Image (cartoon, helix red, strand yellow):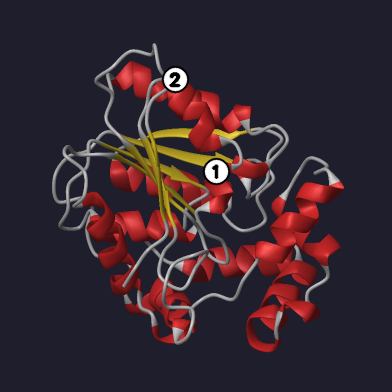
């Protein structure tokens, strides 16, 4: 299985010695969602960054047969990327990527953990109900796109569900073109079949971040996940689910940077 992997060294002249940051994308996305703003920003702050696409996503192999890919398969993809590094990494997972990271840490190790608008260890059921109440049009649109294809999803509905701030038309169109189906098996795994059974096997510094206007992941789930991990918790005001792609993306990136520095990472 060949994965799309983008590695960026820290910017010249920055302080050396920081652990690599490995970014794990959410459902329907790929490595591209981190490359717009987040990986350049953290590279400029002296951090090596790694953004990769899970199998069947972005430029990785496995698009055919994606529906059969399991959460364990995605964990294996993350492990294969981490095995190429010479030291433990800080894992930064968004949405579904946060669940992949949590499953990996049932047995694996990391220098640190950041969850952004992440599915909690109790799975998708709570967040699915939240989305159906908060934005029923988005819930219906995603369900139709997943089963019938992207042409059945109104781009405006998707934008308003993902973003709290206006996105320039050219970028919004590029994001919509990259929006792709997700594995049905993984959706079932994250709902109840293979949710995390225990906290990380080894203690790990952790930050759990949510977005005030997120129609996918309610603040209540963010808080419960933070308690589960004994982690710091941040709810970013004025942001929606796709925090790393908002026009105000720095409002999410800078608290992560502050936390990394305060934690000594």
Q: Taking 129 as reference, is 48 left or right?
A: left
Q: Taking 6 as reference, is 136 left or right?
A: right
Above/below status of 105 relative to 65: above
148 and 136: which one is in front?
A: 148
Q: Taking 221 as reference, is 166 left or right?
A: right
One can see residue 20 in this view: yes
What residue is rendered at 53% in x and 24% in y? 254
Residue 215, image x, y percentages: 67, 56
What residue is rendered at 54% in x and 75% in y? 182
77 and 211: which one is in front?
A: 77
Residue 3, image x, y percentages: 37, 63
- Disc 2: which residue: 45
Residue 218, image x, y percentages: 58, 52
What residue is rendered at 43% in x and 21% in y? 11
- Disc 1: which residue: 35
Q: Quadrant of the C terminus?
A: top left
One can see residue 120 in this view: no
Residue 205, image x, y percentages: 27, 33
């Amino acid at each position: 299985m060949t994965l799309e992997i983008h590695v960026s060294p820290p910017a010249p002249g920055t302080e050396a010695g920081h652990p690599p940051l490995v970014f794990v994308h959410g459902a329907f996305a790929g490595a591209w969602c981190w490359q717009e703003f987040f990986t350049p920003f953290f590279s400029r702050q002296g951090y090596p960054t790694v953004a990769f696409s899970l199998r069947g996503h972005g430029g990785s192999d496995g698009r055919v047969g994606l529906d059969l890919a399991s959460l364990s398969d995605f964990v294996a993809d993350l492990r294969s990327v981490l095995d190429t590094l010479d030291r433990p990494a800080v894992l930064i997972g968004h949405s579904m990527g946060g669940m992949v990271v949590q499953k990996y840490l049932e047995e694996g190790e990391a220098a640190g953990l950041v969850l952004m608008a992440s599915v909690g260890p109790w799975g998708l059921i709570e967040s699915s109900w939240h989305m159906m109440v908060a934005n029923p049009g988005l819930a219906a649109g995603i369900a139709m796109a997943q089963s019938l294809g992207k042409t059945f999803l109104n781009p405006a509905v998707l934008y308003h569900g993902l973003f709290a701030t206006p996105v320039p038309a050219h970028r919004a169109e590029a994001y919509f073109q990259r929006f792709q189906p997700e594995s049905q098996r993984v959706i079932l795994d994250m709902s109840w079949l293979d949710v995390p059974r225990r906290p990380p096997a080894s203690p790990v510094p952790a930050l759990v971040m949510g977005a005030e206007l997120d129609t996918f992941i309610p603040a209540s789930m963010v808080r419960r996940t933070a308690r589960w991990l004994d982690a710091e918790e941040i709810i970013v005001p004025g942001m929606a689910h796709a925090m790393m792609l908002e026009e105000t993306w720095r409002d999410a990136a800078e608290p992560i940077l502050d936390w990394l520095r305060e934690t000594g990472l």
